[in-house]
Amino acid sequence: MRVAAAIFWKDLLIEWRSRDRVVAMLLFSLLTVMVFHFSLPGGATAKTQAMAPGLLWIAYVFSALFGLGRSFSLELENDALSGLALAPTDRGWILLGKVSANLVILGVAQAVTALVFALVFDLTLLPVAPAFAGIVLLGSLGLCTVGTFFSAIAVQTRFREVMLPLLLLPVLWPLLLAAVRATSALLAGEEVPSEAIQLLIVSDATYLIVSFLSFDFILDD
Amino acid sequence: MSRALIEARGLCKRFGHVEALAGLDLTLNAGECLALLGPNGAGKSTLLRIIAGLARPSDGSLSIDGAAAHERTARRRIGYIGHASLLYPELSARENLIFAGRLYEVADPHGRADQLLSEEGLGDVGQRPVSGFSRGMAQRIAIARGLVHEPDVLLLDEPFTGLDRRAARRLENRLDALRQTGHTLILVTHDVASAARLAQHVLVLSEGRTVHESRGPLEPEALERIYVDALEDAP
């Protein structure tokens, strides 16, 4: 647990000093929102508003791919990855430290994106903000867990930029399905389906347990 | 009589079709300094990474005081100083050492970082980012990082690479001091003269096999001759 806290502190400190990941994620997700806005004719119609939750999660996933890819590539400089692998602890704690830091960094980008998205698509987010934040948190936890896990694999391959989306996107579909359903219901003023929340929780738990237990072998040569 | 601390039996490591280690046996006693010599691709760094717990053998066994090298109890006893520094350039020297201390769950990482910076004579630059350090200064911080949890086995992978003569001599003296305080050292190097000055146990590898092993002090010229002969006789 202390090892996870140390990695969380270190990753956020490096990000605070460089700000490269959060800025790249933010710019990319805002550009995605703008592309959606201009590619859908008629501005913020009822039809586009109905599509908005799906588009928002697409923007979130794309920006996460940017940030998560960098999560382990920063460990390649000076072979710092070996420094992490040497720690006398369950290596799953290394993963959890990285996941927590990624969750905070992605959260900052997501919060700003949500505000811009609400303005562009004329959505009323404020009254449902706590529930919206809860759904995004549940979705992002799974996204960051499995994304960080695959980032550690991808970074050790020759085609690391291509490898992460190829590994990540097929595994994400149950989580994205649940996240989009829950967000759609919330923004439409309906009751959030409990099956969607259950699927989010089960996906998060599955990703966390499997990634934690198998991470020990990922960092071996 | 010294006790065997590190024991490898029939150690093999394969990367696909490439055999980096091919049935290596090794016994290293506590407090010894072992020099691992050999040409590029001989398997020296692979052996070091298996001892450090960074790689698992494909076949055979390697134990540190009876525990398999990748087990936590074994990893806690190992200090690893790689060819690269393992440092984060965005962090200061002190922050790097505090972080390493936290990874090893050192009781007082801040105090330990200050102590190590002082021992390395870098107390006045501890707050500066590592990105601005010379290779020699970064190497001193890398050594401090390797010692942060007070390990009794120190693994060094080509630590003299890129150092000027003064920095190399300083590092050699530092390693000699560690050896005299009872640390077990394993040194991978191409620097035969430094190996002869520091090591009492020499292993020359070629193509993943031992082609020479000797114990006892050696003159640099004698070791150079052994090294060259061993490589000429190698398969």
Image: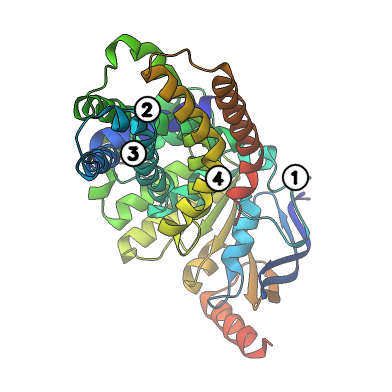
Task: Identify which amino acid the numbered label 4 is placed on.
Answer: Ala
The alpha-carbon separation of the residues under discs 2 and 4 comes to: 23 Å
Q: Residue at x 19, y 43 (%)?
A: A38
> Please, which residue is most extreme toward the top here?
A127
Query: Which comes sooner in the sequence, label 2 or label 3?
Result: 3
Residue hosting label 4 = A85
Judge the density around disc 1: few (<14), some (14-19), many (≥20) Cα neighbours within 10 Å. some
Query: Does B26 sit left or right of A101 as displayed?
Result: right
The alpha-carbon separation of the residues under discs 3 and 4 comes to: 33 Å
- The answer for which chain carries disc 1 is B
Do circles 2 and 3 both sit on a common chain?
yes
In the displayed structure, B222 sits above or below B186; it is below
Callout 1: helix, strand or loop? loop
In the displayed structure, B143 sits above or below A44; it is below
Callout 4: helix, strand or loop? helix
The alpha-carbon separation of the residues under discs 1 and 2 comes to: 42 Å
- Looking at the rendered image, the disc whose residue lies closer to the viewer, 2 or 3, is 3
Task: Identify which amino acid the numbered label 1 is placed on.
Answer: Asp
Q: Position of residue B129 (x, y in %)?
A: 25, 41
Task: Identify which amino acid the numbered label 2 is placed on.
Answer: Val
Query: Which comes sooner in the sequence, label 3 or label 4?
Result: 3
Residue toward you, A154 or B86: A154
In the displayed structure, A25 sits above or below A122; it is below
The alpha-carbon separation of the residues under discs 4 and 1 comes to: 21 Å
Residue hosting label 3 = A59
> Please, which residue is most extreme toward the bottom here?
B232
Do circles 2 and 4 both sit on a common chain?
yes
Q: Residue at x 63, y 32 (%)?
A: A206
Residue hosting label 1 = B65
Residue toward you, A194 or A132: A194
The alpha-carbon separation of the residues under discs 3 and 1 comes to: 53 Å
